[in-house]
């Protein structure tokens, strides 16, 4: 991949942006799978105005802009991206504040920090995010969530971002900012129509509760993840969505096909959680993709169920 699309482009972007600009930054450094080739530009704007300038700059040049949170739901091509990858990590994008029962968290706030903040302020509702890697922005776009199976009340209840978000601040690809009420956004199971927009931050409506009870509820979520998920090796969490047409989850279906431990190169179907693909060392993009395709084929052949990826694929075959 040519790093420079036009002479002087790098200098122009450096002159424009107050934040950090890297050229050819390996995305493997920023994804939880530790896979991904170089981004033509990797930009970390300092604030809203800086981000707007970046977006408009690349928009004028018809250069694609990808927004990255913690890269915990991404499979990125080893060939990298002929695009600008923007990450919101400055202090501005990590602001967090509370007013009454509303917590504002900017897009770059890690989910763990949101959980701790809410607990300190005696506010309950986001404990289901405990143990999920990622940022507020990425979690809103993915409508991240967990199933609460071991609480005293509400056993088996599905909890997701859409249930707690109240309002969002969003930037479009022209650098313009809008406020969206939750009702303006279409949230689905691990999906939203926010893809293609840039989430700047959101307000979450939580409920006052006893701090110890909040802490214990968060710990229950973390405890369950420790026992069910594969946290020993790099992964992107669940690779496939639970299929609507089956009463079994994707993991159970993959397990029924006896695929746990199956390897393609250094990519392996986790021996602990069948819906995780782990990187045993130097897994390549193509190996993970081939393993995903193998899993999809076997589950189709044995269970007549089509598995849809939950992880997002960047490059080579595009977004799915
Ligand atoms: C070990 C492990 C366990 C996991 N467990 C769970 C789980 O229990 N439940 C669950 O739901 N998920 C889980 N995940 C998946 C992942 O953590 C979530 O999907 C998370 O919300 C992704 O957030 P991120 O910031 O890493 O987003 P990224 O992976 O960086 O990006 C995901 C998507 O969000 C977009 N995006 C990111 N930030 C912004 C923004 N500010 N504006 C617009 N678009 C943006 C990206 O462009 C991309 O489309 C797990 C992952 C791992 C590795």
Image (cartoon, grey):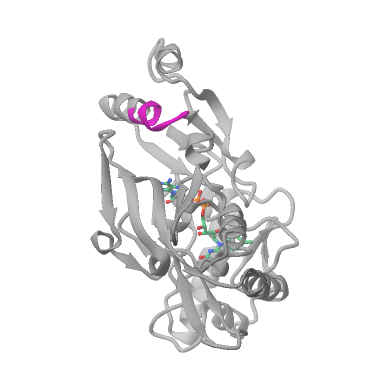
Q: Nearer the viewer, residue 51 or 10?
A: 51
Whether residue 9 is visible here, answered yes or no, is: yes
Q: Main secondary structure of the magenta part?
A: helix
In this picture, residue 188 sits left or right of residue 31: left
Q: How many dots with numbers?
A: 0
The answer to if 49 sits in the magenta stretch is yes
Up-down: is 68 above or below 288? above
Relative to 34, does residue 277 appear above or below in the rendering? Answer: below
Image coords of residue 6 (percent x, y): 38, 15
- Pick the residue in front: 194 or 130: 130
> Is 310 one of the magenta-colored residues?
no
Indicate the position of residue 82 as horizontal and vertical percent values.
43, 32
**Between residues 97 and 5, which one lies in front from this camera angle?**
97
Q: Quadrant of residue 91 in the image?
A: top right
Q: Residue at x 67, y 51 (%)?
A: 283
Q: Position of residue 9 (x, y in %)?
A: 40, 15
Tell me, yes or no, if residue 196 can be seen here. Answer: no
Image quadrant in which the C terminus is located: bottom left
Q: Residue at x 58, y 60 (%)?
A: 115
110 lies above or below 6: below
Q: Which residues are magenta?
A: 45-52
**54 relative position to 297: left or right:** left
Snapshot quadrant of residue 48: top left
Identify the residue at image location x=53%, y=37%: 89
Q: Report the residue at 54% width, 24% height from top.
A: 22
Please provide percent x and percent y for residue 185.
28, 60
């Amino acid at each position: 991949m040519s790093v420079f699309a036009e002479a002087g482009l790098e200098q122009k972007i450096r002159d424009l942006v107050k934040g950090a600009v890297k050229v050819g930054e390996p995305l493997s450094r920023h994804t939880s799978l530790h896979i991904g080739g170089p981004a033509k530009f990797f930009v970390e704007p300092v604030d809203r105005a800086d981000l707007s300038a970046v977006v408009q700059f690349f928009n004028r040049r018809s250069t694609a802009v990808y927004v990255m949170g913690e890269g915990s739901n991404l499979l990125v091509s080893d060939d990298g991206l002929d695009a600008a990858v923007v990450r919101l990590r400055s202090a501005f994008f990590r602001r967090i504040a509370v007013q009454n029962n509303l917590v504002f968290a900017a897009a770059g706030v890690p989910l763990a920090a949101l959980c701790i903040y809410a607990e300190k302020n005696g506010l309950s509702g986001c404990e289901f995010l405990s143990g999920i890697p990622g940022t507020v922005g990425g979690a809103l776009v993915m409508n991240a969530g967990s199933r609460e199976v071991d609480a005293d009340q509400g056993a088996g209840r599905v909890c997701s971002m859409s249930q707690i978000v109240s309002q969002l601040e969003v930037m479009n690809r022209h650098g313009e900012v809008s406020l969206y009420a939750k009702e303006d956004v279409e949230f689905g199971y691990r999906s939203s129509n926010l893809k293609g927009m840039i989430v700047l931050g959101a307000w979450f409506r939580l409920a006052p509760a006893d701090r110890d009870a909040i802490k214990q509820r968060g710990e229950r979520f973390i405890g369950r993840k420790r026992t069910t998920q594969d946290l020993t090796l790099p992964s992107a969490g669940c690779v496939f969505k639970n299929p609507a047409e089956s009463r079994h989850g994707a993991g159970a279906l993959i397990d029924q096909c006896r695929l746990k431990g199956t390897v393609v190169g250094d990519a392996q179907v986790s021996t602990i959680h069948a819906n995780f693909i782990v990187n045993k060392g130097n897994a390549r993009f193509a190996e993970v993709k081939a393993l995903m395709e193998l899993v999809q084929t076997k589950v189709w052949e044995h269970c007549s169920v089509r598995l849809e990826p939950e992880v997002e694929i960047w490059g080579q075959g595009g977004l799915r």
